[in-house]
Amino acid sequence: MSHYQPLAGVKVLDLTAVIMGPFGTQILADMGADVTVVETTVGDANRHMGRGPHPDVSGVTLNLMRNKRSIVLDLRSDEGRAIFEKLVVESDVFVTNLRPGSRERARVTPADLRPLRPDLVWVAAAGYDPNSEHADAAAYDDIIQAATGFVDTNERAGLPPVMAPILIADKVSGMALAQAVLAGLFHRERTGEGTDTVLAMYDMMRAFLLVEHGAEAIPEPQFSRAGYPRLLSPERRPLRTSDGGLVAILAYERHHFEALIRIGGRVEMLDDDRFVSRIGRLNNIDELYREYQRIAGELTTSEFVNECASAGVPVHEVVSLDDVTNSLPMTEHPRLGRYRITPSLAPGVPTDAEPRRFAPLLGENGREVLSELGYSEEEIDELENSGVVGRYRS
């Protein structure tokens, strides 16, 4: 890969699982970091999130594990612990999403690892603040959505109280994890010191949600309930055109509002006191959205899209999830066949960039990693035979 790789040469030891941690380390790996994932004999849960080209590689794994290496290690054994500690010594960054109690039992806290690597950038992803009453509680995406108001926003918008059909808490927190690592590396570059950071999903999602939904409830005294009216309007939805198409628009600013009203021939609305100002349009957002629906319903999809685009109104047809997936560029895994590459969140990475490393099978890089630590072929054979290190099977 010839694109920008700001983390080339940075070694990351990854003891995370499922989505949040692996998504964060995927960003780091795409930036050029050498990410080594320590897995159990059954592998990370993301390896089994649906069908894939191999029993240990799901469609999720093909992209989430790209540019990473995998070693299966029995951390409960003395020999496995010794290997792990050697990996820590060689690493710039350590990330985990074990809960506080599990971190202590696994001996991967800053107090455990700092003596091995004083300038280690140590980052833990957690559900809740370590000083809160829920510090050691299990936290998954659905739980955090329920705890932070996401589910309530659906009900406030007139929808059933359901979770968002996307692992939004995991991925937002995963991006924050990558940012925490970058901040830690920058701090170390400036001071020579390592860092200890715990990221709480609960806090990340409250911060994420309340940027706009805090709204008039942020000042004290509060002007209204929490919640941004435009986003909670039950009328906020794609518009149905005369030929049955679905189109999304955003005509919230004055010039967009005027342009769309003229497209629909509703010029009398331009002088309607309810819609003249931004605050007026916000306070009457339901009626405004209903009017937009009436305008769209009088035109075909192509007519409506072309009229809006010509007038400078932000517009796009609704695209199916299948169409978005099928628009992705293809590549060829050397052992697992063709698959689609998802875009990278790393800066400067082209959307069709080939991975430096394709997603590894479970434990595929164990011998390579051990060899780099100085183990001989005979020693590696012995570690595999004893079950300390998982034997890679294609």
Image: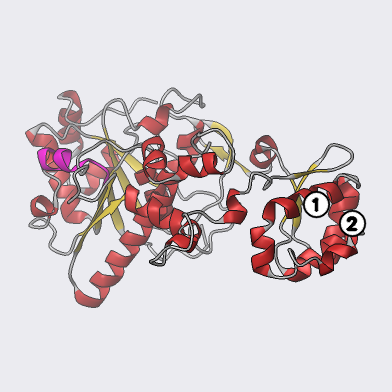
Can residue 29 be seen in this snapshot? no
Percent coordinates x, y for residue 114 in the rendering = 11, 57
- Give the residue type at disc 2: Gly
Secondary structure of residue under mark 2: loop
Q: Rounded to the nearest whole Å, what is the CA distance between mark 1 and mark 2? A: 9 Å
Is residue 290 found inside the magenta-colored segment of the image? no
Q: Which region is colored magenta?
A: 96-105
As rendered, which of 22 and 253 lies closer to the eye? 253
Would you say 89 lies left or right of 304 here? left
Closer mark to the observer between disc 1 and disc 2: 1
Secondary structure of residue under mark 1: helix
Q: Earlier in the sequence, mark 1 or mark 2?
A: 2
Residue receiving disc 2: 264
Q: Is residue 193 above or below residue 321?
A: below
Splitting the image into 4 quarters, where does residue 239 fall?
top right
Percent coordinates x, y for residue 58 in the rendering = 47, 30
Residue occupying image coordinates x 25% and y 29%: 390
- Give the residue type at disc 1: Glu
Circle 2 packing at 10 Å, graded few (<14), some (14-19), many (20+), is some
Splitting the image into 4 quarters, where does residue 260 fall?
bottom right
Q: Is residue 294 above or below residue 220?
A: above
Labelled disc at residue 148: none
Residue receiving disc 1: 291
Q: Is residue 83 above or below residue 381?
A: below
As rendered, which of 169 and 235 lies closer to the eye? 235
Percent coordinates x, y for residue 45 in the rendering = 36, 30
* Dots 1, 2 in contact, CB < 8 A: yes
Q: Is residue 20 above or below residue 272?
A: above
Magenta: main secondary structure? helix
Percent coordinates x, y for residue 43 in the rendering = 32, 30
Numbered-mark total: 2
